[in-house]
Image (cartoon, rainbow, N blue to C red):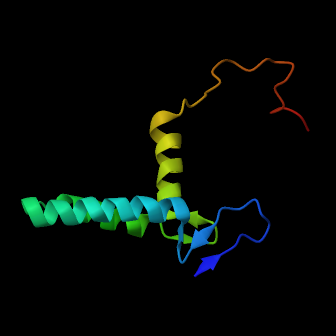
Amino acid sequence: MYIYPDNLKSKAVLWLWELRDIAIIGVGALISVFAMAQLGFLPPVVITAAYAFLSIRLEDTSILDFLRYAIRYFLLGQQTYAWGLCNPSTDRSDRK
């Protein structure tokens, strides 16, 4: 069942996934079936199933989005720290 976006700016979804995720899962499933049938190689099936689970979208967010934001914040983003002594004129600790 195709659900059209309410405000025309949100992304289109099909069941619990965005259409882009459905395409990625479909291509991954085809590659996984080929790898399993011809080579007896199981990791593509596991990767596709993990992506399908992590990309389930509920209330416009998914676990995969949360993991991307967390990795970007904790590992890839520059953290800014302000070091230095306080200026006595701006020190408000003695203010009554």
- Left or right: 50, with 78 as reference point: left
Q: Choose top left, top right, bottom left or bottom right for residue 82.
A: top right
Vertical placement of residue 21 versus 82, above or below: below
Residue 58 is situated, as x and y percent measured from the top left of the image, at 58, 73
Asked whether 88 or 37 is in front, the reply is 37
Q: Residue furthest right?
A: 96
Asked whether 58 or 95 is in front, the reply is 58
Residue at horizontal 46 percent and vertical 65 percent from the top? 22
Q: Is residue 42 visible?
A: no
Q: How many marks?
A: 0
Residue at horizontal 75 percent and vertical 59 percent from the top? 9
Residue 92 is situated, as x and y percent measured from the top left of the image, at 84, 31
Quadrant in which the N terminus appears = bottom right
Q: Choose top left, top right, bottom left or bottom right for residue 25.
A: bottom left
Q: Choose top left, top right, bottom left or bottom right for residue 91.
A: top right
Residue at horizontal 77 percent and vertical 71 percent from the top? 6
Residue 11 is situated, as x and y percent measured from the top left of the image, at 65, 62
- Left or right: 53, with 7 as reference point: left
- Left or right: 48, with 15 as reference point: left
Q: Residue furthest bottom?
A: 1
Vertical placement of residue 56 versus 65, above or below: below
Residue at horizontal 47 percent and vertical 58 percent from the top? 64
Q: Is residue 17 visible?
A: yes
Residue 45 is situated, as x and y percent measured from the top left of the image, at 23, 65
Quadrant in which the C terminus appears = top right
- Left or right: 21, with 50 as reference point: right
